[in-house]
Amino acid sequence: MIKKHCLFCDEIVSIQPEGDYDRYLGCSCSPGGFYSLLRDSYEPIHSFPHQKKRNMLHLVSAYIRELTDCDEKIILSVDDLESITNSPNIPVTIEDKGNRLLQYLYRHSEGPGESVVIQPLARSYNLTYSLNLQELVYIIDKLSNEKFLIREGMNFKLTEKGWREAAASAGRKKLKPCVVLISEEEDLRTVWQDRLLPKIEQCGYQPRLLTHTKAHNREKYSLELISNSKLIIADLTGQSPEVYFTAGYALGLNIPVIWTVNRRDADKLFIQIKDIRPVVWETAEDLAVILQQRLT
C-alpha cells in the first residue's frame, strides 16, 4: 500500500487513492479510522510558512480526531483549514480543552469507573487540541487533582463527578457578552469580522462589533449594550472619538477594556495616556494570538 506523510499529525501512514482524494488510514488524526484530503491540496498545505503550520495543523488534527471519533466522515481541502481553525467550536481555554478529554472518556465508557486505554499517550495530545504532550499531561493532572478522573498508567476512569461534568459539558457553552469598538473603516471592519471575532468567541465571549455609522444594517454604539458587557475591546485605529468616549464610559462602570491599535496609527493617537497602553498590532494573525493570550 502507498505510504505518505500526514501533514496534520506528522506520521507516515498508508493512503488509499479515491478519485481526486487520498484517504489517510489509521494515523493519530483518526486511530482506527480515516480522513480524506484533496490530492491537489497537499502541496499548498505543505508550503505554508512554519508559523502558520505551528498555529494551525495541530488544531486540524484534533478536529479530525474528534469528529471521526464521533463517526463523522471528514473530507478536506486547503480551503477548509481557515474556517476550521477560526471556528468558535475549537477550544482555547484549559477548561474547555479538559472538557474535550472528559467527553472522549465519556464516549468510550459505559459509566463512571470504567477504564479507557489511551495508547500511545505521546501521540494523543490532539484529544485536547493541545500543541504538545506537556499541555496534555498538565490537563490530565489538573483533572485528576479536581477529582474528575483517575489515571493509572495508560488507563483512565471518569469519577462520578467527571461523568456528570462530561454529560453536562457536551451540550453546554455559555458565552459572556463582549463589545468590540472600531472606527468606520470598511477594511478594518472586514479584518475584525472575519479574522478576529471568531478567535474571541473561542475564548468564551460573544463579541458584538459596533461602529459609529449611519448605515441602517449595522449595529450602532449603544450604552445599554456597553453596560451589559463583561469585556470591551477598543481599537483606536482610525482615530474615532466615539471609541474613546464609549470605552471611557465602560471604564467608568468598571468593565475591563483591552485597547488595541494598528501600528500605522500608534504614534499619532489623539490622546497619549500611559494608562491606555494599547496593544500595537500589524497583522490580524498577530493580534489574534495576543488577544487569546490575554483572554485565556
Image (spheres, rainbow, N blue to C red):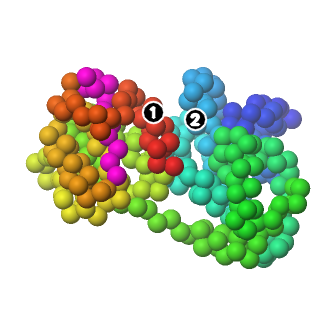
Are the residues at dot 1 and dot 2 in contact (C-beta closer than 8 Å)?
yes
- Judge whether residue 271 can be spotted in this image: yes
Q: How many marks?
A: 2
| Circle 1 residues within 10 Å: few <14, some 14–19, many ≥20 | some
From the viewer's perspective, is residue 141 above or below residue 134?
A: below
Which residue is found at the position 44% from the left and 53% from the top? 201
From the viewer's perspective, is residue 217 above or below residue 235?
A: below
Residue where numbered disc 2 is placed: 55
Q: Residue furthest front?
A: 274
From the viewer's perspective, is residue 252 above or below residue 199?
A: below
In the image, taking residue 119 as reference, residue 200 lies left or right, namely left
Residue 176 image point, x, y percent: 40, 61
Report helix, strand or loop for mark 1. Answer: helix
Which residue is found at the position 20% from the left and 43% from the top? 243
The amino acid at mark 1 is Glu
Give the magenta range: 256-267
Distance Cα–Cα, label 1 vs label 2 = 10 Å
Residue where numbered disc 1 is placed: 285
Question: Is residue 265 part of the magenta span, yes or no?
Answer: yes
Front-lying residue, 19 or 177: 177
